[in-house]
Amino acid sequence: MKKYLLTGLLAITMLLSGCSFLGEVNNSVDYVNQATEHINTLNDFADEAPQMLKEAAADPALKQELEDRLITLKQDVEEFIALKDVPALAEDVHQELVNQNEALLAEINNVLESGNLALDKLENSELFITINEVTSLMNRIEALGQ
């Protein structure tokens, strides 16, 4: 009888540890998806903003659109920095992303003077360089999903 009980307990333990492993895999996949989506958002902004910036000086509506996109980008960066459910496998990469996002947030805050876009500051900022540094971590993030 003890053999059966021990075998049953061993099977349950193995099953539960398997569930834990699957949970960690699911968390990793979720994190990779969130990080990839965040980086794609940054890339989209970096691709579109330079042209918008050139035209924004002459077009107040375009300047407002660029300002709105920066505010939305700022919110996205703040949400990413606040992520708490980071799998152990991704902690190092996530910390690098957080550091880069904090630098990006400082750049965004710098070009949004009192909540308004300062075009000259955006032109002279390192915002796009910082976005490129964040996106350079994409390969490491994709490797987490494999």
Image (cartoon, helix red, strand yellow):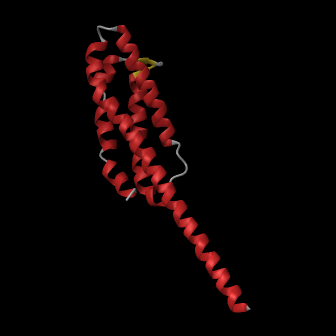
**Residue drawn at (39%, 44%), measured in percent from left and top?**
36
Residue 106 location (% of width, % of height):
42, 33
Question: Quick check: 18 above or below 124?
Answer: below
Residue toward you, 69 or 133? 69
Residue 71 location (% of width, % of height):
45, 25
Residue 108 location (% of width, % of height):
40, 28
**Residue drawn at (39%, 38%), measured in percent from left and top?**
103
**Residue drawn at (39%, 49%), measured in percent from left and top?**
96
Q: Point out the image quarter for the N terminus.
A: bottom right
Question: Quick check: 75 above or below 7?
Answer: above
When asked about the image quadrant of residue 12, the answer is bottom right
When asked about the image quadrant of residue 66, the answer is top left
- Number of marks: 0
Q: Is residue 127 visible?
A: no
Residue 2 location (% of width, % of height):
72, 91
Q: Is residue 11 left or right of residue 73?
A: right
When asked about the image quadrant of residue 98, the answer is top left
Q: Is residue 66 left or right of residue 15?
A: left
Residue toward you, 126 or 18? 18
Q: Is residue 29 visible?
A: yes
**Residue drawn at (30%, 42%), measured in percent from left and top?**
133
Question: Quick check: 64 above or below 13?
Answer: above
Q: Point out the image quarter for the C terminus.
A: bottom left
Residue toward you, 136 or 16? 16
